[in-house]
Image (spheres, coloured by chain):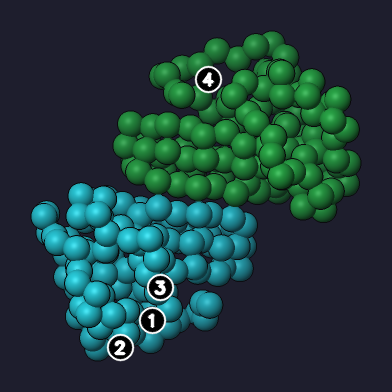
Chain colours: A cyan, B green
Amino acid sequence: MTTKFQTLSPALRTLADQHCHAGAARLADADLASRLSTLGGWSSADGRLSKSFAFANFHETIGFVNALAWIANREDHHPDLTVSYSRCAVAWSTHDAGGITENDVVCAAKTDRLLA
Amino acid sequence: MTTKFQTLSPALRTLADQHCHAGAARLADADLASRLSTLGGWSSADGRLSKSFAFANFHETIGFVNALAWIANREDHHPDLTVSYSRCAVAWSTHDAGGITENDVVCAAKTDRLLA
């Protein structure tokens, strides 16, 4: 899943530059489909935007978790993580909106940028 | 689940002072039952020793994850973690042995000691 540096599309870079806003509404299906085509490798299920990232070892995996935590705390928007030795599955969701909002899309783009 | 400081029994403290050893064998059911009665709040299912810890916020949760990662790297034995805003579920298992070994019990005790 991860090479040393990944290239972000201009559209993904623009998304990653955005910030979370309070009160974001759940994305309509068509908007979500459009966002998923901009994001690479993310999937939508059960109102969550998810992607799994692979790493060489636990040190790298925990480094990624901490970089993600920095973003989450800055944006005051927090993912669910499933962490093992060489893998971290990330799920973004907006509980208040009952599903996926633009805030989740923005944070997914910021997540991808950690590998870019 | 977590108060500020938890008290460890002498038996749990003794366990937490041990270290992982290569080639640990899967615990027999009776031995596992005995270990579970020493450990508090851990359960065994699908060859994994699991417990969920609650925290006040994401900063505390990630702090716990990092303390746990320190232990995991020191012992060269790594848990699976399920991390959300205020909760971290920890699962110890020994893949090579196909289930729960004394190494998992020792690491569970070390995990509890983080809250002690």
**Residue lying at 48% horizontally and 62% vertically, measured from the top left:** A89
User: Looking at the rendering, which quadrant does residue B62 occupy?
Assistant: top left
- The residue under label 1 is A40
Disc nearest the viewer among 3 and 2:
3
Identify residue type, mark 4.
Answer: Ala
Disc 1 element: loop
Cβ atoms at labels 1 and 2 below 8 Å apart: yes
Q: Is residue A104 visible?
A: yes
Measured in 3D between alpha carbons, the distance from the residue under mark 1 to the one under mark 2, in whole angstroms, is 9 Å
Measured in 3D between alpha carbons, the distance from the residue under mark 3 to the one under mark 2, in whole angstroms, is 18 Å
- Mark 3 closeness class: few <14, some 14–19, many ≥20 residues within 10 Å: some
In the picture shown, does residue A96 fall above or below A106?
above
The chain carrying label 3 is: A
Q: Give the mark nearer the N terminus: 1 vs 2.
A: 2
Disc 4 element: loop
In this rendered view, identify the residue nearer to me: A84 or B46: B46
Disc nearest the viewer among 4 and 3:
3
- The residue under label 2 is A9
Identify residue type, mark 1.
Answer: Gly
**Residue lying at 55% horizontally and 12% vertically, measured from the top left:** B7
| Image mark for residue A43 | 3
Identify residue type, mark 2.
Answer: Ser
Disc nearest the viewer among 1 and 2:
1
The chain carrying label 4 is: B
